Amino acid sequence: MDKLMISGGRPLHGTVRISGAKNSAIALIPAAVLAETTVTLDNLPQLSDVAIYGEILSELGASISWHADEMIIDPSGMRSAPMPNGNVKKLRASYYLMGALLGRFGEAVIGLPGGCNFEPRPIDLHIKGFEALGAIVTNENGALHIKAKELRGAKIYLDMASVGATINIMLAASRAKGSTLIENAAKEPEIVDVATLLNSMGANIKGAGTETIRIEGVDTMHGCRHSIIPDRIQAGTYMIAAAATRGDVTIDQIIPKHMEAVTAKLQEMGVKVYEMDESIRIVGQPEYNHVDVKALVYPGFATDLQSPMCTLMTQSSGVSVLTDHVYGSRFKHIPELLRMGAKVKMEGRSAIIEGATLSPARVHATDLRAGAALVIAGLTVPSGRGITEVTGVEYIDRGYDNLVENLTSLGAEIWRETIKE
Ligand code: EPZ
């Protein structure tokens, strides 16, 4: 087990290049199952979840090869084998195998995802979609058994604009007979990325990125090459870190439109933001205004940037309010920030944040975005105050490839140490 050691007070300077989106990659890899011939995905992030998904597809008979940041998937030899345990329990997004295997083979047995560290994350809407398409779904010993003699298109209304449910239903409906309408669909860029891949494979999907998606099922799908969109959450994390350390950082290889909500909030705080075609430059300021932030579904402020933003908001004057309307209890980073001298009170799903100077402490990350918030907090501690130690690095590594290397190249004093048992 590792921990991150951070000596703060050094404004970040320079350019950081953003890799492919984690939350796209872990949907695009299972989506390749629907093809009969080779799918090549490039701009893949170097993350453990990606490697685990490669192992899972191999276990199902796919042949997987890697070339730089490309993953080459030949799904021709695949079959739908039961996967009640094992690797599927290591990552939450293994549930995308349900839609993919159901779409290609008409059946799937997948272990339910492990618990998440900020709140229960049901998949009832995924199941509602599969059943609407004609599948029988049973929960046996913690694994979902999903089977359909024939998948038929249906009209499905999502009670919540769920990213996972939208993608999972798109996967299964791609090969259903007839047309499927998903209403109140999620509109995140990752949904568009998956629909783009599926259409390149021969699917017929319209409306991805809007709240209504229409899918005309097709009999067969083929391979293609697809480049993954940049990771907007990773990009937003570096934007926030640049502002928090009062640095001057260019975040490169991104789609600025995907960053609109965080750009707007940083500007409201007084951060200087310069947008170029494929990059954004952040210039931090000595003083920040307090702001109110609401984490919402896209295009609202991303819940995955809520915890890093919370750290930045401790650096503003006055009182700020941060409310998460997606996950009401995604605030496990707050007690850790309090240990660093932050002044935050919780009121329901809102954090009331006063300005404070942070001091070093030993803190623990309980999920990957909380980990990012704590790393930014360590960077924000004024110099000469000592070292912040962040444990739970295994969570951070799931969402941020090359974090220590990138921050070091931006001038941060951060390094890994192995925790002596
Ligand atoms: C995706 O999770 C992301 N994960 C999450 O990122 C992200 O926080 C979330 O979308 C919201 O943007 C991946 O893409 C792998 P949801 P997902 O279904 O699909 C409720 C990260 O840090 N809901 O959009 O699981 C749910 O409880 C991770 O990278 C149901 O009630 O999120 C939540 O309140 C964390 N029933 C809301 O909908 C369901 O069947 C949004 O969840 C599904 C969801």
Image (cartoon, rainbow, N blue to C red):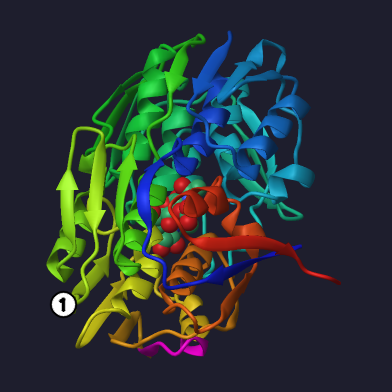
Residue 35 is situated, as x and y percent measured from the top left of the image, at 54, 14
In the rendered image, residue 244, in percent from the top left (x then y), is placed at: 33, 68
Q: Count the marks: how many?
A: 1
* Front residue of this view, candidates 407 and 325: 407
| Residue at 32 percent of width and 44 percent of height | 251
The quadrant of the rendering that contains the C terminus is bottom right
Q: Which residues are magenta?
A: 338-345
Say which residue appears at 45% left-offset and 56% top-offset. 411
Locate ligand 1 by image quadrant. Answer: bottom left
Position above or below: 89 against 180: below
**185 or 75: nearer the eye?**
75
Reading the image, the residue beneath label 1 is 289
Residue 344 lies in magenta, yes or no?
Answer: yes
Label 1: how many Cα within 10 Å (few below 14, some 14–19, many 20+): some
Look at label 1 and name its amino acid.
Asn
Q: Position of residue 147 (x, y in %)?
A: 63, 33
Q: Is mark 1 within 8 Å of ligand 1?
A: no
Task: Give the left or right position of residue 234, taking residue 400 as reference.
Answer: left
Most extreme residue toward the front is 384
Q: Quadrant of residue 414?
A: bottom right
- In the rendered image, the quadrant that contains the N terminus is bottom right
Q: Is residue 342 left or right of residue 136?
A: left
Residue at 72% from the left image edge and 55% from the top image edge: 142
